[in-house]
Amino acid sequence: MALLMFAAGCRQDMQNQPRMFPQRGSSMFADGRSVRPQVEHTVARGQLYEDDYFYTGLISGKEADFMPFPVTMQVLERGQERFNVYCTPCHSRVGNGAGMIVERGYKPAANFHDPRHINQPISHYFYVMTNGYGAMPDYKAQILPQDRWAIAAYIRALQLSQNAKLSDVPAGEQVESLKTVAQQQGYPESDAGPWPMPATAVYGAPIIGTVAGAPAQNPMPVAKSAAAQQQKKGAAAKP
């Protein structure tokens, strides 16, 4: 009797309940589709992209040179933290493109301190992180939009740090050379010198010299910006 009661309770209704398969027909709905259309005039939670520039880095299809929100010390600290996580393997801690994977044979990354990259608008960096560029993949799945902008702001801070002049220093502040700082902290003086690139490094553009201890490239014409190049590729793909 106990066995019969137990067997009666082992029904599979929940396991075997009818379910819809994506893209298959269904007789339940009048249009015959199992996949239901989105409700008109509604926006999914977290997908209200009101500020187009904040999410794309473009205005009328072009990059711009301003941040979509105020840059505070908290923003820069967040940008530094995300930069150190995602960008330093290729670009190095100072952004000169001499990261650790370059030392292991990977193509040298962009040197943010050469004329080509200093002259780029700030949204260029956001756009590249969002869509990728050359050998660099996109990072939109790993880095939130606000963090991509924070990284772009921190890149500007890096550019200032490696190209600063004495006139940029507030009055009364003492300035020491990197070699002096290295010696004071017990590091060899050579740590403050140029970063040598491996002999296996291959560059995709002509090198004009050395900036921030790494090879530098000439400024890129506006027509060859990341956004312009992607638009050109899209046009070439059309029949």
Image (tube, rainbow, N blue to C red):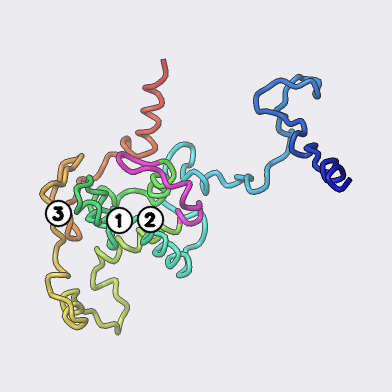
User: Do labels 1 and 2 touch, CB within 8 Å?
Assistant: yes
Which residue, given by chain and number where applicable, does mark 2 sit on? 86
Residue 9 in the image, given as x and y percentages of width and height: 84, 44
- Distance between the Cα atoms at labels 1 and 3? 14 Å
Q: Mark 2: which amino acid?
A: Tyr
Residue 30 found in image quarter: top right
- Helix, strand or loop under label 3: loop
Q: Which residues are magenta?
A: 132-149
Q: Nearer the viewer, residue 110 or 35?
A: 35
Q: Nearer the viewer, residue 148 or 3?
A: 3
The N terminus: image quadrant: top right
Residue furthest right as drawn: 1
Q: Going by the picture, which residue comes out furthest to the top?
A: 239
The residue drawn where x is 13% and y is 75% is: 188
Quarter residue 11 falls in: top right
Look at 40% across and 30% down and name the residue there. Answer: 231
Instruction: Read off the residue under disc 3.
Output: 197
Horizontal side, residue 217 vs residue 79: left or right? left
Q: Residue at x 42, y 19 (%)?
A: 238
Q: Amino acid at mark 1?
A: Pro
**Residue 39, percent across and down?**
74, 34
Q: What is the tally of numbered marks visible in this picture?
A: 3
Q: Is residue 187 above or below residue 66?
A: below
Distance (Cα) linking label 1 and label 2 = 7 Å
Where's the C terminus, which quadrant?
top left
Does the magenta-highlighted stretch encompass residue 72? Answer: no
The answer to whether 71 is drawn above or below residue 26 in the figure is: below
Instruction: Look at the numbered disc 2 and give the secondary structure of its residue.
Output: helix
Residue that numbered label 1 is attached to = 89
Prevailing SS of the magenta stretch: loop
Nearest to N terminus: mark 2 or mark 3: 2
Instruction: Estimate the spatial distance between the alpha carbons at disc 2 and disc 3, rounded to whole Å.
Output: 21 Å
